[in-house]
């Protein structure tokens, strides 16, 4: 199996390096990751500045760009016709509304745009956690790789995988889930730099709002692996008929 591996935490992040070492035992792996932390980059592309690649070992590269840039360059220049694109392991969950901002999910989505099945993998740890069980998430990916080739919708496969921050022995199962929702994020934090100039920080994300049974939030709270099939079609299909009637009632002229 040929795999293109990327992330949004940067090429030095422990998640991507531990996953890379494990995948090298079962696959040919090309790793192309940002040269810095690009969390929250979403699907952004670098269009106004040149991109540069730096080699860090055999088939291991960093790019001065976004996760989406990395997948473009990896698939266009270096990957050996990959069977799959894997993004992660992210340090922190990507659940609910997070997927709209996540560079981890964006890298997987770009792989799908460019014709390859994709996994986005996140460890649902938090900044205050003293222990981060990346080994559990690595084991989950290795198990998934045994079965994803039988996934019923290969041509559209993007699986958003969140793994609870527990040991492998503490996992309580696997769940197919839908995306939950968060409360709106905390207000912007307004402060000053050491020279008295005004600066701002984006507030932290809100707590879970829709976290009931069947959601990714609920699965993680039960120490279960959450797997959510996602796609990039943002059309609200159930609103098309009502929206068409509304437009006709407006008597809009061509």
Image (cartoon, rainbow, N blue to C red):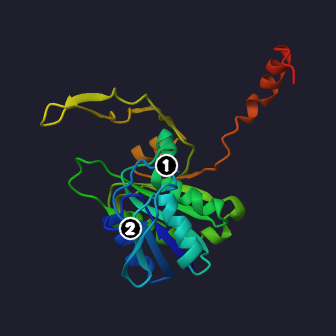
Q: Mark 1 points at which residue?
A: 42
Q: Which label belongs to residue 126?
A: none
Q: Quadrant of the C terminus?
A: top right
**Dot 2: element:** helix
Q: Position of residue 217 (x, y in %)?
A: 45, 42
Q: Mark 2 points at which residue?
A: 16
- The CA span between labels 1 and 2 is 18 Å
Find residue 38 and report its image quarter. Answer: bottom left
Front residue of 55 and 111: 55
Find residue 150 and report its image quarter. Answer: bottom right
**Dot 1: element:** loop
Side (left or right) of 153 relative to 65: right
Find residue 196 and report its image quarter. Answer: top left
Residue 49 visible in image: yes
Residue 152 visible in image: no
Side (left or right) of 116 relative to 87: right
Q: Where is residue 125 in the image (x, y as percent from the top left)?
A: 32, 51
Front residue of 63 and 219: 63
Q: How many labels does the image show?
A: 2
- Binning the other alpha carbons within 10 Å of mark 1 as few (below 14), some (14 to 19) or many (20 upward) gives many
Front residue of 27 and 78: 78
- Sequence-wise, the earlier of marks 1 and 2 is 2
View extreme (left): residue: 194
Q: Position of residue 140 (x, y in %)?
A: 45, 65
């Amino acid at each position: 199996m040929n795999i293109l591996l990327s992330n949004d935490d940067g090429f030095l992040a422990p998640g991507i390096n531990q996953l890379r070492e494990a995948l090298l035992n079962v696959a040919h792996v090309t790793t192309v990751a940002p040269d810095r932390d690009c969390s929250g980059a979403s699907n952004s592309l670098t269009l106004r500045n040149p991109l540069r690649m730096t080699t860090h070992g055999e088939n291991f590269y960093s790019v001065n760009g976004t996760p989406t840039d990395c997948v473009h360059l990896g698939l266009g220049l270096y990957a050996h016709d990959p069977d799959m694109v894997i993004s992660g392991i992210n340090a922190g969950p990507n659940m609910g509304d997070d997927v709209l901002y996540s560079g981890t999910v964006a890298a997987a989505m770009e792989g799908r745009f460019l014709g390859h099945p994709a996994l986005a993998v996140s460890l649902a740890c938090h900044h205050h956690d003293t222990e981060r069980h990346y080994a559990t998430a690595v084991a989950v990916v290795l198990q998934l790789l045994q079965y994803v080739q039988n996934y019923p919708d290969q041509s559209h496969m993007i699986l958003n995988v969140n793994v609870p921050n527990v040991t492998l022995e503490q996992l309580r199962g696997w769940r197919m889930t839908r995306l939950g929702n968060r409360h709106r994020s905390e207000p912007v934090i307004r402060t000053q730099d050491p020279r008295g100039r005004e600066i701002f920080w984006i507030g932290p994300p809100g707590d879970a709002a829709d976290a009931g049974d069947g959601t990714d939030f609920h699965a993680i709270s039960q120490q279960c692996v959450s797997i959510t099939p996602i796609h990039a079609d943002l059309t609200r299909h159930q609103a098309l008929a009502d929206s068409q009637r509304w437009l006709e009632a407006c008597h809009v002229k061509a």
